[in-house]
């Protein structure tokens, strides 16, 4: 019985993604200003725990919802690049990632 449940769960993840890509898709939050050249500050931070495009979208949405901020996640590289119109502390970025349910890891260069 346990094996059957495990196989059914695994097939569901393959079909729907690890974070509910099937019927529970994450809606994209667009930043107020999409022109990256308007954001003079940028920070690249590693992120642990991302497994699919919904994971990446959740992190991007958390930053895009903030005023004067936009972000782009590189899922295969497991990092996010956060752009901001105002200076921000590295710890602030890590807190946003943590509140989203992921873990910020040592900054990547």
Image: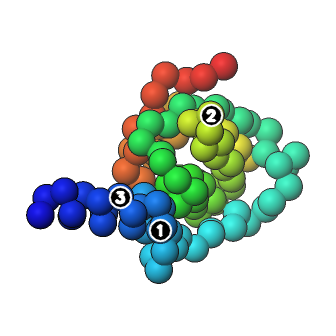
Number of residues whose C-alpha sits closer than 10 Å to that of mark 1, classed few (under 14), some (14–19) or many (20 or more): some
Q: Which mark is residue 98?
A: none
Residue 49 x %, y %: 42, 42
Q: Which residue is mark 3?
A: 10
Nearer the observer: mark 2 or 1; the answer is: 1
Where 93 falls versus 30 (above or below)? Answer: above
Number of residues whose C-alpha sits closer than 10 Å to that of mark 3, classed few (under 14), some (14–19) or many (20 or more): some
Q: Is 26 in front, or is 95? A: 26
Nearer-N-terminus badge (2/1): 1
Where 15 falls versus 80 (above or below)? Answer: below
Nearer-N-terminus badge (2/3): 3
The quadrant the N terminus occupies is bottom left
Disc 2 secondary structure class: loop
Residue furthest left in the image:
1
Say which residue appears at 62% left-offset and 68% top-offset: 29
Disc 1 secondary structure class: helix
Residue at mark 1 to residue at mark 3: CA–CA distance? 10 Å
Q: Which residue is mark 1?
A: 16
Say which residue appears at 79% left-offset and 45% top-offset: 39
Residue at mark 2 to residue at mark 1: CA–CA distance? 22 Å
The quadrant the C terminus occupies is top right
Asked where in the image residue 30 lies, by quadrant, the reply is bottom right
Say which residue appears at 58% left-offset and 73% top-offset: 27
Q: Which residue is mark 2?
A: 77
Nearer the observer: mark 2 or 3; the answer is: 3
């Amino acid at each position: 019985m346990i094996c059957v449940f495990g196989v059914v769960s695994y097939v569901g993840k393959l079909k729907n993604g690890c974070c509910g890509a099937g019927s529970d898709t994450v809606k994209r939050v667009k930043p107020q200003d999409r022109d990256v050249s308007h954001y003079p500050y940028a920070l690249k931070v590693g992120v642990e725990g991302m497994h699919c495009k919904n994971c990446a979208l959740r992190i991007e949405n958390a930053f895009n919802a903030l005023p004067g901020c936009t972000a782009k996640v590189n899922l295969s590289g497991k990092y996010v690049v956060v752009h901001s119109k105002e200076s921000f502390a590295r710890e602030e970025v890590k807190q946003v990632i943590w509140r989203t349910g992921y873990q910020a890891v040592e900054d990547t260069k």
